[in-house]
């Protein structure tokens, strides 16, 4: 038995060095890599390291771009300051966001590569519960990336995913990032933009849309421009939003209350204070 294992692993190594060209071989390569980078559950940063692994795997599959990995790193820094947990303030923002989604006539969830890799199940579930269209919107757009993301989202249950054939443009934006679909983002009244580029978020607001952003940086333009900003890590924020939509779906009174109680700037200020307190406490230790 040991002989077989050793021969097989030698065969894999030779193949690895000589190059791979088929899908099944790629799969074996990624399994080998996964084994090499296996993260022990006892690691204090387990959750965070697993997210990194998922993004790296998404990068290997051509779904995540290198810039997306860097953006995640900037987010990790803010999550560190936040204490890597969902705060009372982000729960309140999430409830208001759920209420806004439920009130919308034509809600759309805009998905990029990082979101597709990090929370495809929640995107699909939320789109069904909130009757929202899903649209792929990429800063670094290629047809190949869009089609890979579309396939991934569909495998996780999302239906009628838009974005492959954009037929409209967001005014005021140059570059491919302005591309969108008439039936999706262009005609939406509420757009959920988890992890959106600041410029695009601003342009959507200028179109008169209400936007919901998920962004760990309470100071970013994205956070300061959205109608509602959930300052939380996206893999914690999305399931929380799903739960709130489920909870408020048949309680319009509670939904109205959640929305009326929410004040974006006050919410962001409290979170920034929390981050600053955490930093001070850490330095005092
Ligand atoms: P801008 O002021 O233009 O909005 P920005 O600081 O938001 O700039 P971007 O390049 O738009 O920078 O996006 C990176 C931001 O995305 C990070 O700072 C972080 O706040 C957010 N982000 C990245 N990954 C995550 C994540 N997994 N969950 C939540 N937020 C994230
Ligand atoms: Mg931003």
Image: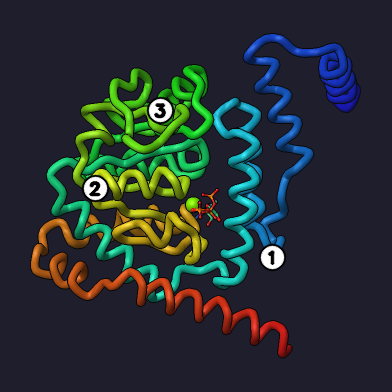
- Extreme residue in the top direction: 21
Q: Residue at x 67, y 57 (%)?
A: 41
Element assignment for label 1: loop
- 121 to the left or right of 205: right
For discs 1 and 2, the disc positioned in front in the rendered view: 2
Which quadrant does the C terminus fall into? bottom right
Dots 3 and 1: beta carbons under 8 Å?
no
Which quadrant does the N terminus fall into? top right
- 148 to the left or right of 52: left
| Badge 2: residue crowd in 10 Å (few <14, some 14–19, many ≥20) | many
- Which numbered disc, 2 or 3, marks the residue that appears first in the sequence? 3
Q: Quadrant of residue 167?
A: top left
Mark 2, residue position: 209
Cα distance between the residues tagged 2 and 3: 29 Å
Residue 25 numbered mark, or none = none
Image height of 267 relative to 203, above or below: below
Mark 3, residue position: 155
Q: Nearer the viewer, residue 252 or 71?
A: 71
- Which numbered disc, 3 or 1, marks the residue that appears first in the sequence? 1
- Extreme residue in the bottom direction: 284
Image height of 247 relative to 260, above or below: above
State the image coordinates of residue 253 (x, y, percent, origin top left): 9, 68
Q: Nearer the viewer, residue 132 or 248?
A: 132
| Badge 1: residue crowd in 10 Å (few <14, some 14–19, many ≥20) | few
Q: Residue at x 45, y 20 (%)?
A: 147
């Amino acid at each position: 038995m040991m002989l077989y294992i050793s021969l097989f692993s030698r065969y894999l190594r030779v193949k690895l060095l000589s190059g791979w060209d088929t899908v099944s071989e790629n799969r074996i390569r990624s399994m080998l890599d996964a084994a090499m980078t296996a993260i022990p559950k006892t690691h204090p940063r387990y959750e965070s390291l697993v997210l990194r692994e998922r993004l790296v795997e998404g990068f290997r599959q051509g779904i995540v771009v290198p810039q997306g990995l860097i953006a995640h790193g900037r987010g990790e820094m803010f999550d560190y300051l936040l204490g890597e947990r969902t705060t009372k303030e982000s729960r309140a923002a999430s409830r208001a966001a759920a209420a806004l989604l439920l009130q919308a006539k034509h809600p759309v969830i805009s998905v990029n590569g990082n979101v597709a890799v990090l929370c495809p199940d929640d995107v699909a579930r939320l789109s069904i519960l909130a009757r929202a269209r899903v649209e792929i919107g990429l800063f670094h757009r290629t047809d190949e990336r869009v089609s890979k993301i579309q396939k991934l989202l569909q495998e996780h249950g999302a239906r009628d995913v838009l974005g492959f054939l954009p037929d409209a443009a967001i005014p005021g934006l140059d570059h491919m990032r302005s591309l969108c679909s008439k039936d999706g983002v262009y005609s939406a009244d509420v757009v959920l933009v988890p992890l959106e580029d600041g410029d695009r978020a601003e342009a959507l607001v200028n179109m008169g849309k209400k936007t919901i952003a998920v962004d760990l940086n309470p100071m970013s333009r994205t956070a300061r421009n959205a109608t509602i900003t959930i300052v939380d890590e996206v893999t914690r924020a999305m399931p929380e939003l799903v739960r709130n939509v489920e909870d408020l779906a048949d309680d319009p009174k509670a939904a109205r209350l959640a929305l009326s109680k929410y004040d974006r700037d006050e919410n962001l200020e409290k979170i920034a204070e929390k981050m600053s307190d955490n930093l001070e406490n850490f330095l005092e230790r």
